[in-house]
């Protein structure tokens, strides 16, 4: 699913009687945030909630933009753009879009950055573009400590790739030029 | 031919390192260059670091050119962190045009690594060290990355880093092999305080690839001059300092003397292991380098 990271929304706290709407686009929003979290966000923004489904299909329903002074988007960057275009209004994103991720070890990790050059079959099914801080193509760098990346403390994907290749007795494949 | 390329595999090579200034005042840097000139006959190249640890310094290319103009052969360190392929090629052409031959091809430390003073900087990493080595090899054959002709081939003597104490020695051996296949001429290791780690790595490499690379490996050495340095060095991933070294530094009356003694012992061990030489990184203290070279 598309990974969304909440921005600092404290600057939107006071609304001076503004009429506000928080547009929530599912399924991505509810994959990233629980119902309770979404409710808390709407309360913090003092905004009504409008739930939409896959705005990326260029379809929305039941929003009258004239009824609101400010419209916030809990959705990916593409969703915000489509919503702004359809409503012909400024939409304020309250999240940053990080990439395509998975739920793992009680957290979320980016597994795909949509680079447009997929070569997962060469790296034993693990993406070095999204999962290596330097997107290295030829093996681990010197910044590995205890099999983890020095930048984000996540497992070094190149160590995992190496171990996988070794277990399959296919290390020679890693000597090929990407 | 560079002095380094002429003498590697023939003599025990000593290279060392200089750090470009952190600002446009060149006074101290030129002073250090003058110091290095005094022991020029003992060294075969001076590495010029490229924003190490993502900490800002003057361009390593400009500093390398300054060294060339002062009659000292630099080992121009070039990282893929701050340059896309066009910028790398452009800097390499400039280096070659000014007579620089030795280039150390590095991926580079991430702007968000622990030591960085530019955590907000955008990391490029379009190429990595292996791809950069391949690019230089191609430029030595007169072609750019797009396969078009340069007006003259470059003449790079290509170096790369080696981390014998890497978390996975086998993975490091594999990457080392890739660097060799890409066209590397010499390796400089990460700072080492314990020679058996290097020996273990070389044995693993030899077992995996049936190839002896000892004569093109220069052992990375930092002569300690204070006990506090140990704490700083241990923050670098993969650096191992044995308790015996820590104790010697702790107990020593004259820390610099003890550090030089340890460094000289490591140089002896590099010779015993049949390595091509040693790469001495004086961590900004030229006086340490001067004293150490005086002992060789």
Image: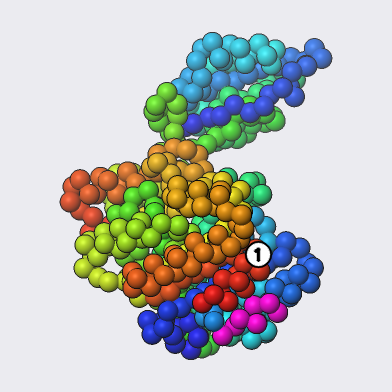
- Residue A58 picture location, percent across and down: 52, 31
Q: Residue at x 63, y 46 (%)?
A: B119
| Mark 1 secondary-structure assignment | loop
Q: Is B68 situated left or right of A167 in this image? A: right
Q: Can residue B273 be seen in this view?
A: yes
Q: Does the magenta stretch include residue B88?
A: no
Seen as rendered, the residue at the extreme right is A16
**Quadrant of residue A63 within the rendered picture:** top right
Give the tally of numbered discs. Answer: 1
Q: In the rendered image, which quarter is residue B173 located in?
A: bottom left
Q: Is residue B201 visible?
A: no
Return the residue nearer the eye: B139 or B38.
B38
| Vertical side of B16 occupied by B194: above or below | above
Q: Which residue is nearer to you in this view: B39 or A6? A: B39
- x and y percentages locating residue A93 in the rendered image: 63, 29
For the rendered model, the colour scheme is: rainbow
Q: Mark 1 lies on which chain?
A: B
Task: Indicate left or right for B116 with A34 as reference.
Answer: right
**Predominant SS of the magenta segment:** helix
- Viewer-closest of B130 and A84: B130
The spot of residue A167 in percent (x, y) is 20, 45
Magenta stretch encompasses residue B39? yes
Which region shows up in magenta?
A: B34-41
Q: Name the residue under label 1.
A: B285
């Amino acid at each position: 699913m598309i990974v969304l990271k909440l921005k600092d929304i404290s600057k939107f706290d006071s609304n001076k009687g503004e009429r506000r709407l928080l547009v929530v686009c599912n399924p991505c929003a509810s994959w990233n945030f629980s119902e309770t979290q979404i409710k808390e966000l709407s309360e913090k923004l003092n905004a009504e909630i409008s739930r939409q489904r896959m705005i990326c299909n260029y379809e929305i329903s039941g929003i009258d933009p004239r009824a609101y002074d400010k419209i916030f988007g809990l959705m990916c960057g593409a969703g915000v753009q489509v919503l702004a275009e359809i409503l012909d209004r400024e939409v304020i994103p309250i999240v940053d879009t990080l990439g395509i991720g998975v739920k793992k070890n009680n957290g979320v990790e980016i597994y795909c950055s949509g680079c447009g050059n997929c070569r997962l079959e060469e790296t034993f099914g693990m993406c070095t573009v999204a999962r290596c801080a330097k997107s290295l193509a030829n093996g681990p760098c010197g910044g590995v400590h205890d099999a983890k990346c020095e930048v984000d403390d996540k497992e070094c994907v190149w160590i995992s790739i190496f171990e996988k290749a070794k277990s399959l007795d296919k290390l020679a494949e890693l000597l090929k030029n990407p | 031919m560079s002095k380094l390329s002429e003498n590697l595999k023939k003599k025990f090579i000593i290279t060392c390192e200089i750090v470009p200034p952190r600002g446009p005042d060149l006074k101290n840097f030129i002073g250090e260059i003058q110091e290095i000139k005094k022991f020029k006959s003992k060294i075969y190249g001076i590495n010029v670091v490229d924003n190490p640890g993502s900490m800002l310094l003057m361009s390593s290319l400009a500093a390398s050119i300054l060294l060339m103009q002062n009659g000292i052969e630099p080992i121009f360190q070039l990282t893929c962190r701050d340059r896309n392929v066009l910028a790398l090629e452009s800097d390499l052409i400039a280096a070659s045009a000014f007579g620089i031959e030795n280039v150390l091809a590095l991926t580079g430390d991430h702007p968000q690594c622990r030591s960085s003073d530019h955590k907000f900087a955008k990391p490029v990493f379009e190429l990595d060290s292996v791809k950069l080595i391949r690019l230089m090899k191609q430029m030595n054959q007169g072609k750019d990355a797009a396969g078009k002709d340069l007006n003259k081939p470059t003449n790079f003597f290509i170096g790369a880093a080696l981390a014998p104490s890497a978390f996975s020695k086998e993975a490091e051996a594999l990457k080392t092999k890739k660097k060799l296949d890409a066209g590397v001429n010499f390796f400089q290791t990460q700072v080492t305080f314990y020679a058996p780690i290097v020996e273990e790595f070389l044995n693993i490499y030899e077992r995996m690839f049936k190839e002896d690379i000892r004569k093109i490996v220069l052992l990375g050495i930092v002569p300690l001059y204070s006990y506090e340095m140990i704490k700083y060095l241990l923050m670098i991933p993969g650096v191992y300092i044995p308790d015996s070294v820590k104790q010697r530094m702790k107990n020593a009356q004259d820390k610099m003397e003890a550090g030089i003694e340890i460094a000289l012992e490591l140089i002896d061990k590099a010779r015993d292991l049949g390595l091509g030489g040693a790469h001495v990184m004086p961590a900004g203290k030229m006086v340490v380098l001067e004293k150490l070279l005086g002992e060789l």
